[in-house]
Amino acid sequence: MDLQEKLLNKKDELQKAIERKKDNLMITVRESTDELSMYDQHPADVASDLYEREKDAGLLEMMELELQKVNDALNRYQNGQYGICSICGRAIEPERLDRLVYTTQCIQCARQTKDNFTRPAEEDISFSGAMSDRGESFEIAGYDFYDPEN
């Protein structure tokens, strides 16, 4: 199987999966639970259903992003740029292309760029242990959360 055929197969597979997810998400919550009324439903049951729908929406978004990457790889294939690292310009390893057909980086460049994620600023202030470092207290039921004697 040549590379273009692999890309086209991956594109077809993703398009079918996306259509299935979209069809499932088009069904209302009431219809998906097979309940006549939502009035008598326990809030935890409704929350579980909502969680599953949100998870499906996230998976759909991930698959659409992957489809976009496959389409970009097909464009690179047609332009003669497929299999060439977008950073260093060297050939991407055939094993890597076999495993990740839409990749744009060789393994060396991918390893160098993988840790460039910057943590969100909110994490600097939301760590609960930081409160005790500043001398602040955090009480639960009248007891200091950080005091080991309580």
Image: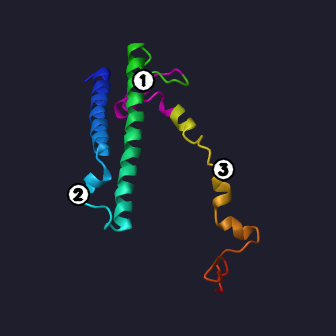
Which residue has dot 1 on it? 72
Which residue has dot 2 on it? 34
> In whole angstroms, how far apart are the C-alphas of marks 1 and 3?
32 Å
Disc 1 marks a residue whose amino acid type is: Asp
Disc 2 marks a residue whose amino acid type is: Asp
Q: Which mark is residue 121?
A: 3
- Circle 3 — which element? loop
Callout count: 3
Residue 19: in sight, yes or no? yes
Q: Within 10 angstroms of label 1, few (less than 14), some, or many (20 or more) residues?
A: some
Q: Which residue occupies the foreground of this view, 34 or 118?
A: 34
Q: Which residue occupies the foreground of this view, 97 or 58?
A: 58
**Which span of residues is magenta-colored?**
89-108
Looking at the rendering, which quadrant does residue 50 occupy? bottom left
- Circle 2 — which element? loop
> In whole angstroms, how far apart are the C-alphas of marks 2 and 1?
41 Å
| Residue 111 picture location, percent across and down | 53, 38
| Residue 145 picture location, percent across and down | 64, 77
